Amino acid sequence: MTEKLNVVPFVSVDHMMKLVLAVGVERFLTELSAYVEEDFLRWEQFDKTPRIASHSHDGVIELMPTSDGHLYGFKYVNGHPKNTRDGRQTVTAFGVLADVGNGYPMLLTEMTILTALRTAATSAVAAKYLAPKGADTMAIIGNGAQSEFQALAFKALLGVNKLRLYDIDASASQKCQANLAGMGFDIVISDNAQDAVEGAQIITTVTADKQLATILTDNMVGTGVHINAVGGDCPGKTELHRDILLRSDIFVEFPPQTRIEGEIQQLPADHPVIELWQVMAGKAQGRSSSAQVTLFDSVGFAIEDFSALRYVRDKLIDTGLFEELDLLADPDEPRDLFGMLLRAAKASAI
């Protein structure tokens, strides 16, 4: 990939799909997980702030920025559950990676597909440290756009090959089952959430409705289970009964953000939680017993998007799956920006 001062590599949705397919979905998730883990292990090097959110009655629009001092990345992302009624995605996103040294963007990319991949990769990385050893069965409650990615990430990283699916819309479960056919899973569609969690060592909740919901109740969660709570990701949106939180060891990405947006918004501000990066770095304990209930209260954090942007940019070098976007003004003399307009006017008159 040749550097040009006035153009930025742009990865469209079409190019992203081609990139994922060229790499292979499970390999993509595995390699992306390694980037996520690498960045979590240098967590203290990053700028960190809760995402900047603009909430409305219909949904939320957010900016998620971070920097490691060398590269700067941000993601624009929305969450509008009602969109599916109009044939639109609940979540859409795009992102930018830039050079801190000169401020020039180095990559502009779609991140709707990439966010689903990075969310699943992060979930699986967390489960490496928190799920019971040898876990092979996962319940997925909420079988929308994220469900297949979660299943494939857990298969690729942990060897999960049995799925128990439930969604209030049975067609969503059927869609998930059909999409994963032939990919090495034994899949059961359940009639309710209680049946879905039966026998599962890992429970993933990934619903979309923006409300204080109770997808899991305390009596549904046995000892030794790992809960991957993905769907509660903004103020006023949760999936778990408060009693589950009170008997779980809770692991989070960035506490100041998770206390606003995650399941722990139901708890006092001083309720103890453990930062996932500390477990990965050996500074805190993850799973400590076979009876322990672990909960990854996942809301998504900017460093995960930064990892995804780094990964995609590295992949472009060999694949060439991008186009050059004329995004940056490049006058002959850096101080003569107006002169560019004059030259353009002269050229158009010829």
Image (cartoon, rainbow, N blue to C red):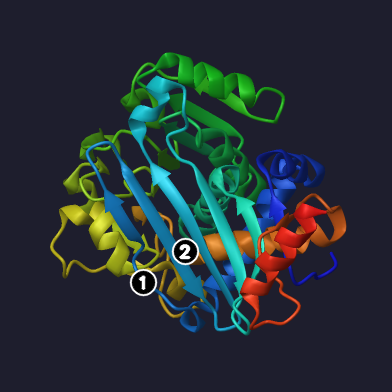
Q: Amino acid at mark 1?
A: Thr
- Image quadrant holding the N terminus, namely bottom right
Position above or below: 143 against 293 = above
Residue at point 47%, 54% (across, down): 76
Observer-nearest of 2 and 113: 2
Position above or below: 133 against 336 = above
Residue 216 in view (yes/no): no
Q: How many marks?
A: 2
Q: Which mark is residue 169?
A: none
Q: Amino acid at mark 2?
A: Ala
Residue at point 28%, 54% (across, down): 261
Specify the quadrant of the image occupied by residue 177: top right
Residue at point 61%, 71% (across, down): 98
**Do labels 1 and 2 touch, CB within 8 Å?**
yes
Disc on the earlier residue, 1 or 2: 1
To which residue does mark 1 refer? 49
Residue 340 coordinates in the image, percent (x, y)? 69, 69
To which residue does mark 2 refer? 302
Left/right placement of residue 282 relative to residue 177 reads: left
Residue 166 in view (yes/no): yes
